[in-house]
Amino acid sequence: MPIPEPLITTSPARLNGTPVFAGTRVPVQSLVDHLESGDTLDEFLVDFPSVTREHAIAVLELAKSALLAQAVAA
């Protein structure tokens, strides 16, 4: 299955505008919460089968890129 573009969408009519994995009703925050609690990516994917591994990894890569773009040289 191809990775959707954009990766993340919002809509006031869907979960009050919460950012979700495009094409699903799964909040991106759910992935962050799972990882923060020590769950693996596989555990997240079991809980949310509408999100593909490739889609989840692409969202994590997007987050990584955003964080690294904000890095300040010391």
Image (cartoon, helix red, strand yellow):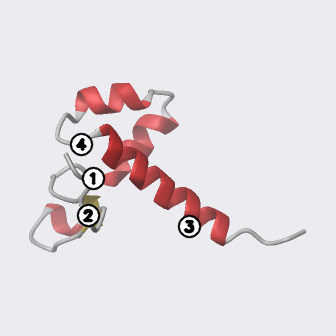
Which is closer to the viewer, label 4 or label 1?
Answer: 4
* Cα gap from disc 4 to disc 2, whole angstroms: 16 Å
- Residue 35 in percent (x, y) is at 47, 36
Image disc number at residue 66: 3
* Cα gap from disc 1 to disc 2, whole angstroms: 7 Å
- Please tell me in which quadrant of the rendered image residue 8 appears: bottom left
* Cα gap from disc 3 to disc 4, whole angstroms: 21 Å
In this picture, residue 13 sits left or right of residue 57: left
Crowd band around label 2 with a 10 angstrom C-alpha radius: few (<14), some (14–19), many (20+): some
Q: Earlier in the sequence, mark 4 or mark 2?
A: 2
- Give the farthest residue toward the left: 13
Q: Are marks 3 and 1 in contact (CB under 8 Å)?
A: no
In this picture, residue 60 sits left or right of residue 22: right
* Cα gap from disc 4 to disc 1, whole angstroms: 10 Å
Q: Are marks 3 and 4 in contact (CB under 8 Å)?
A: no
Image disc number at residue 51: 4
* Residue underneath mark 2: 18
Residue at 42% in and 41% down: 33
**Local secondary structure at mark 4:** loop
Q: Are marks 1 and 2 in contact (CB under 8 Å)?
A: yes
* Residue underneath mark 1: 27
In this picture, residue 61 sits left or right of residue 55: right
